[in-house]
Image: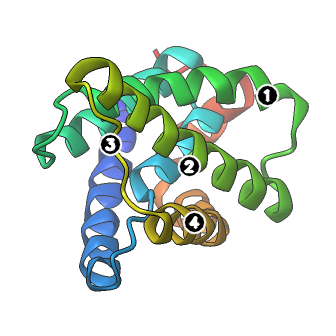
């Protein structure tokens, strides 16, 4: 129960930081992937089932505020976690360099997959614009080390820290 509560607190923090990111970068027409960054961090901490669940719920949260394709972000975030879990054992995600590169690349993949989901389900490619695509992916990668430090230093309880060693949430 404590592990679930800890994951829920991290989810609430992710939603608040996502809202702040939207408020700061929407006037610049840039969409940063704060929820994706938190999902990637939690995927590195939780088991696969826990990571998929956290990512799906993060995507579903974004879908509730989207008026284009309901369920698109939930599907795309789940697919992104599939890719992340395939490369998770090959990288050291605690180092800043891989965090920035992997998060930026996964954000690019997220934007493209969301566009293709729009093409499949609505008949038109959902494109956010080149500025939002490039700057949003770069900023998501650059903010990732700060989000990672914030989560690992201040938001994770000891129960989840111990859980991190053998990755079993559920």
Q: Which residue is mark 3?
A: 126
Give the foreground label among 3 and 2: 3
The dot on residue 87 is 1
Q: Give how far apart the Cα atoms at labels 2 and 4 are.
A: 10 Å
Q: Residue at x 28, y 33 (%)?
A: 124
Contact (Cβ within 8 Å) of mark 3 with mark 2: no
Q: Give how far apart the Cα atoms at labels 1 and 2 are.
A: 15 Å
Give the foreground label among 2 and 4: 4
Q: Position of residue 89 (x, y in %)?
A: 84, 26
Q: Earlier in the sequence, mark 2 or mark 4?
A: 2
Q: Give how far apart the Cα atoms at labels 3 and 2 are.
A: 15 Å
Q: Is residue 3 visible?
A: no
Q: Which residue is mark 4?
A: 134
Q: How many marks?
A: 4
Badge 4 density bin: few <14, some 14–19, many ≥20, Cα 10 Å: some
Callout 2: SS: helix
Q: Which residue is mark 2?
A: 107
- Tell me the colour scheme of the image: rainbow
Q: Give how far apart the Cα atoms at labels 4 and 3 are.
A: 15 Å
Q: Earlier in the sequence, mark 3 or mark 1?
A: 1
Indicate whether 26 appears above or below 53: below
Q: Residue at x 32, y 42 (%)?
A: 126
Callout 3: SS: loop
Give the foreground label among 3 and 1: 3
The dot on residue 95 is none
Q: Position of residue 128 (x, y in %)?
A: 36, 57
Q: Position of residue 156 (x, y in %)?
A: 51, 51
Q: Is residue 111 visible?
A: yes
């Amino acid at each position: 129960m404590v592990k679930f509560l800890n994951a829920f607190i991290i989810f609430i923090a992710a939603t608040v930081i996502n809202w702040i990111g939207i408020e700061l970068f929407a006037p610049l027409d840039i969409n940063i992937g704060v929820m994706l960054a938190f999902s990637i961090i939690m995927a590195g901490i939780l088991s696969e089932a826990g990571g998929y669940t956290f990512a799906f719920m993060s995507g579903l949260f974004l879908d509730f505020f989207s008026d284009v394709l309901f369920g698109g972000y939930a599907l795309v975030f789940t697919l992104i976690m599939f890719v992340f879990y395939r490369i998770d054992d090959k990288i050291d995600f605690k180092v800043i360099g891989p965090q920035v590169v992997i998060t930026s690349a996964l954000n690019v993949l997220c934007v493209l997959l969301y566009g293709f989901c729009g093409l499949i389900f609505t008949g038109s490619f959902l494109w956010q614009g080149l500025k939002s695509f490039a700057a949003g992916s770069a900023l998501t990668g650059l903010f990732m080390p700060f989000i990672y430090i914030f989560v690992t230093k201040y938001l994770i309880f000891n129960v989840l820290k111990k859980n991190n060693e053998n990755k079993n949430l559920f």
